Amino acid sequence: MCGFVGVRRFDGCPPDIALLQRMSDVIAPRGPDAHGMFQQGPFAVAHRRLTVIDLSEHAQQPMVDRELGLTLVFNGCIYNYRELRQELEGRGYRFTSSGDTEVVLKAFHAWGQEAWQRLHGMFAVVVHERDTGRVTLARDRFGIKPLYLAQTRDGLRFGSSLPALICDPEVDRSIDLMALDHYLSWHAVVPPPLTLLKGVRKLPPGSSLSIDGEGEGTLHTWWQLSVQADPELAALPVREREDMVEQALRTAVQRRALADVPVGVLLSGGVDSSLIVALLAEMGQPGLQTFSIGFDGAGGEAGDEFMYSDLVAQRFGTTHHRIHIPTGQLMDALPGTIAAMSEPMVSYDNVAFYLLSREVAKHTKVVQSGQGADEVFAGYHWYPHLATVPADSAAAAYEQVFFDHTPEQLTQLLLPAAQAPGMSRAYVDQHFRGIGGSSVEKALHLDTTVMLVDDPVKRVDNMTMAWGLEARVPFLDHELVELAGRLPVADKLGDGGKGVLKAIARRHLPREVVDRPKGYFPVPILKHIKGPVLDLVRDTLASQAARQRGLFQPEAIARLLAHPSDHLTPLRGSRLWQVALLEMWLQTHQL
């Protein structure tokens, strides 16, 4: 796992290497093991490396192949790189390293844009062609690895982190009002290519962008997901479908055990992460380490789920690490958590992942995590609600159970100059109209391809990489997800959600873990805002920077501050925290 930044100028001038170094300094936590830079004419890149596969100097980046005329920077992990290498060697390619980076470079030379389809894994890639000056950027199917872009007067900036790009004063830092509407409406989800800043965009998942020597770009979508029941699959016995899913999950977990360093598991105690532990243990992975985190309770809510993670750790004999974070440490970690966000993310468990990653990184460089199962296998509470809704009413029903604010509420919250109400709802309406299937299948498609990418997946990447920790997500193995998309909806909605996964889990896990209420990384003090958190929020929103920004109606902020617990979203999130987190993020990055 790594990070990179780069510049491609189109005005005939060489890049500013001092600027590139400042950009690289921002992403240093993503790759603490090595640093490299390369410049060729108007193109320059910097790379930060976390050594996981091929720990030798031969796999350093930027990787330059002078014989092929290619320079590559790569962030991610390709789980089938050995098979691809064997195929490439059969075509006459020679290798000087033993890892996946050189395989990606030579795969691009051999197959061009078709190379991305052959890669199994997570990746953000930039390739520069010496002879034509063309730059190609590509991102994996689920956007597990980030890739941000900024177009300026003289060229293109790109990198693994939005804050790295705004080191360049030429990048437009003004707030994109369409993105602001998404952030406040859709639980901080801002779909690509938008970001909260007008001058920064992100490459959509499953796509590539080729930019020629004159600066003209072509966007290519190389992968799309279908979520619609397959009649042939539905005709099979239920147990046979369960066996197919279990085998696909087993393959996904086994693929993500690939490393030249130990691989642990972030164990919440829920079905998803517990099932990963079970499968790894059954595969015989030696010295398996598991990690769980908990906080002080608040508002009558418990702050940990150790009783479940302990059951799993004991069942499979893992080396288990219980990490309890007192409220004072949580408060101390908030500035670092917010600084680690490439974009503002409102979910409470950002700080949980941040602190968990800090501790886990002391023991290992790689972990597997259960993110993605709820979106792929219908684990959220809104999917059963949608099961009774006609397809032509699906968008409105989805918005009712998910969205944090209605357009009318946003007009009361935002000052007139900051309003673009309805943009997020129009986006969902258009997405639902553009795909087939039932209401549940439409929602699963949207959540897997958009919401998942710009909330849970981004959260895990940002928080783990803040400590140089690589997180792998087997539930987002594309073959597993494609299989899930073809299953009958009933397989997913059964048993209160994730029915097929729970059926598999009962073969491997303690029943108490499978039949427990749905859990979540609990961070109670950020939901029940009071005491030191309320003081922080009040100071932030009363600051001169917030007043001068002129986004929110003062009367609306006063109402939120007066009674924080009275203003919760349909997802039971705090509207006050959503507003305050946005302002904290903007101030942290001096925007």
Image: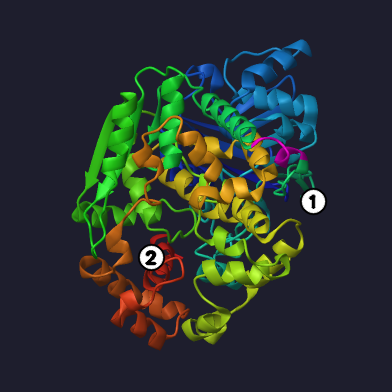
Location of mark 1 (residue): 216
Dot 1 or dot 2: first in sequence order is 1
Towards the viewer: 365 or 162:
365
Scheme of colours in the image: rainbow
Residue 584 marker: 2
Total label count? 2
Work out whether 99 lies above or below 391.
above
Q: Which residue is found at the position 63% from the left and 72% from the top?
A: 396
- Residue 208 appears at what percent x and percent y? 72, 43
Residue furthest to the front in view is 237
- Residue 221 appears at what percent x and percent y? 76, 46
Type of the residue with mark 1: Glu
Q: Quadrant of residue 416?
A: bottom right
Towards the viewer: 310 or 403:
310
Answer left or right for 287 relative to 446.
left
Secondary-structure class at tag 2: helix
Answer left or right for 587 relative to 294.
right
- Residue 164 appears at what percent x and percent y? 50, 50
Towards the viewer: 149 or 167:
149
Q: Which residue is found at the position 49% from the left and 71% from the top?
A: 404
How crowded is the residue under tag 1: few (<14 C-alpha within 10 Å), some, or many (20+)? few
- Is 487 in the magenta? no
Q: Which residue is found at the position 65% from the left and 67% from the top?
A: 389
Q: Which residues are magenta?
A: 232-237
